[in-house]
Amino acid sequence: MPSYRVLLAVGSLRPGARPDSLLPTAAASAAEHTTVEANDIMMVRGEPQLVVRFTGADDPFALGVGAAVESTIAQLADVRSARVTRRDGGAWTLVGAV
């Protein structure tokens, strides 16, 4: 089964949201739909980006998982961008924006 990632660039937090809750919430959201393989936070050009890696049957399924994660995190923070990538050999290929 292919490996996918949803990458969410996040900005300001919503009132009452805690920064340390974003990554566990994103992973839990994905886990409602599929197996989560890993999760992490990266800094890309000075902007925090949540990364949740998961398995998926195909690209449309992975985009659906990505949309669910984006929707969940948008309740806690400003999501500046959201995209899903698929592992192809040693590289990640863009599947699409969420």
Image (spheres, rainbow, N blue to C red):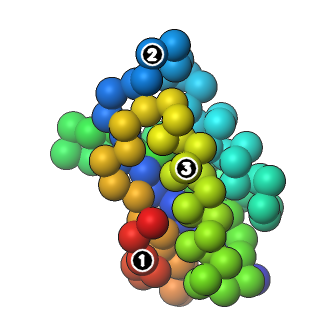
Q: Position of residue 56 (x, y in %)?
A: 71, 76
- Residue type pointed to by label 2: Pro
28 and 98: which is toward the camera = 98
Quarter-wise, where is residue 15 in the image? top left
Quarter-wise, where is residue 82 in the image? bottom left
Residue drawn at x 53%, y 41% as measured from the top left: 73
Q: Earlier in the sequence, mark 3 or mark 2?
A: 2
Residue pointed to by mark 2 = 15
Q: Earlier in the sequence, mark 2 or mark 1?
A: 2
How far is disc 3 from disc 2 in space, using C-alphas?
17 Å
Tag 2 secondary structure: loop
Label 2 crowding class (10 Å Cα cut-off): few <14, some 14-19, many 20+? few
Question: In the rendered view, would you say 43 is above or below 37?
Answer: above
Residue pointed to by mark 1 = 96
- Residue type pointed to by label 1: Gly
Question: In the rendered view, would you say 20 is above or below 84?
Answer: above
Residue drawn at x 66%, y 86% as measured from the top left: 58
- Residue type pointed to by label 3: Ser
Q: Position of residue 4 (x, y in %)?
A: 59, 71
Residue drawn at x 32%, y 34% as measured from the top left: 11
42 and 59: which is toward the camera = 59
